[in-house]
Image (tube, helix red, strand yellow):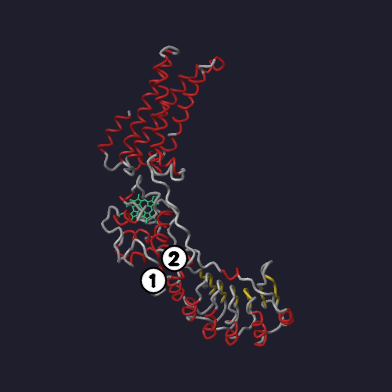
Amino acid sequence: MGFVLLMIGGILDNPPDILLFLGRFHPVVVHLPIGFLIMAILIQMAARWPKYKPLAIYTPIAWFMGAVSAVVAVIFGYFLSLSGDYDEDTLFYHQWAGIAVMFLSFGCYYINKKWNNSLSVPKWILVFLIGFLLMFTGHLGGNLTHGSTYLLQYAPNPVRNMAGLPSKMEPRKKVAVLDSADVFLDLVLPMMQSKCVSCHNEGKKKGGLMLTSYETMMLGGESDNTIVPGDALKSELVRRITLPMEHDDFMPSEGKLPLTDQEVVLIKWWIKMGAPSSGFVTQLDTEKSLSSLVSNYLGLDKNNLFNNKIPPPDRAVVDSLINRGFVINPLMKDNYFLDANYSLSEYTLKASDIDVLLGLKEHLVWLNLGNSKVKDGYLEKIGLLHNLVKLDLKGNEITDAGLKSLSQLENLESLNLYGTKVSKGILELVPKLTRLKTIYLWQTQVTKTDIIQLKKENPGLTIIYERE
Ligand code: HEC
């Protein structure tokens, strides 16, 4: 049976889908012979003890089930191999070792049935040979699916060295400051490692492409333009990662976790810069157009404001603000950062209230002035509250004229402008707020076109925007 199918293999250059479909069941089906055959071996051994002697009547049936399920596994395995996705050498040994297991198991069944207790030595040789081949086949099967480096990837170095593998590479230290970030080692390579190498490695070179190192990446794959240094748009790799996700050529295929927008921007930029094998981001990015994106991507923009210890606030200032209608709350237990909220006040906010706020310049990190009749003129002073991380200005009659004053808020991560009169001015403001992560622009005069531009220029930013 196996042979007949093997012969078809030569004939079938384009295997029909149904065979490929069945082939995908091989990894499941293959557990049946493994289970039955291990059971057969164990029964065979146990039955040598007088206590377990009665088990001996089950040996032939265990071998028979093992052998028959091996036939099914071999057939499905053969279908799977038709996809041509596997390393040929490993496949050759895996296939023939599997076929050998199948025939030897039938042999073992036959021996057990015919000669029960005689023929002892050859029988035991056969049993152990099957046991060994079973492990060998399974191991090669694992290599085929996961790549030959999979099993020992995390093994201790002595074990790796014994197997002829080099010692593990020291993992690259996490970048602590933007200046030390390397374009390939800290950006491109880790992306490939987490999202692409499972299919593009030594063992499984899909599309002829290996994405495990700089050299192999640049060798490219089946197309001769996998990566065209200096020209992102001509690079097949860029085409693949920017296609619509449902396109057949989209990478990563098979619904694997895709690259994020940020990652796509970074890869395109790397190729545009000539796809160098290394180089500091800050030196390549002379216009500093990407520094905030890269810091955000590498998690370097975590606000370290909160590591500063600040003195307790002036009690008189806090009391005065409370009397003026503010709700003031401490933000954390062991520090004096404060949250000030005016949005629930029944008074009307006055310019003098803002002057008092400035007395807590170091302490205020959250400020909610939602629906408080804030005027453009007030923003000039609010812009001086340089420790603000979150600023809520929703529902106020403020415009682009006022926005300008906010550009000094270097710690700002969240800015709520919902229901204000701001418009194009945000396009100028946002790039200056380097830590900004979220901006609310719903029901403002910002147009859809502005939003598209904002998104394009600030891929790391979350924009909350919707229009009836
Ligand atoms: C689930 C497996 C899988 C993953 C994960 C995967 N690929 Fe692929 N890739 C394939 C297969 C299969 C092919 C060959 C078939 C084809 O051309 O579409 C291929 C082909 C390619 C090619 C074409 C090679 C050439 O030079 O013509 C490129 C480029 C590529 N992949 C890039 C990537 C990138 C980048 C990632 C990570 C974002 C990735 N792949 C992740 C399976 C995968």
Q: Is residue 386 above or below residue 225?
A: below
In-image side of 359 versus 463 (left or right)? right
In-image side of 4 versus 43 (left or right)? left
Residue type highlighted by circle 1: Asp
Q: State whether label 1 is within 8 Å of ligand 1.
A: no
Q: Residues within 10 Å of mark 2 (few under 14, many from 20)?
A: some
Q: Quadrant of residue 399?
A: bottom right
Residue 23 numbered mark, or none? none
Q: Earlier in the sequence, mark 2 or mark 1?
A: 2
Evaluate whether residue 370 shows in this view.
Answer: no
Image coords of residue 408 (percent x, y): 53, 80
Camera-side mark, 2 or 1: 2
Image coords of residue 423 (percent x, y): 50, 81
Tell me the CA gap for discs 2 and 1.
13 Å
In-image side of 229 versus 267 (left or right)? left
**Which residue is the site of mark 2?**
180
Image coords of residue 221 (percent x, y): 29, 53
Residue type highlighted by circle 2: Ser
Q: Residues within 10 Å of mark 1 (few under 14, many from 20)?
A: some
Image coords of residue 154 (percent x, y): 46, 45
Q: Is residue 217 above or below residue 54?
A: below
Q: Is residue 100 above or below residue 255?
A: above
Instruction: Check if mark 2's residue and mark 1's residue have beta carbons within 8 Å.
Output: no
Q: Nearer the viewer, residue 157 or 374?
A: 157
Q: Is residue 222 above or below residue 329?
A: above
In-image side of 104 versus 441 (left or right)? left
**Which residue is the site of mark 1?**
285
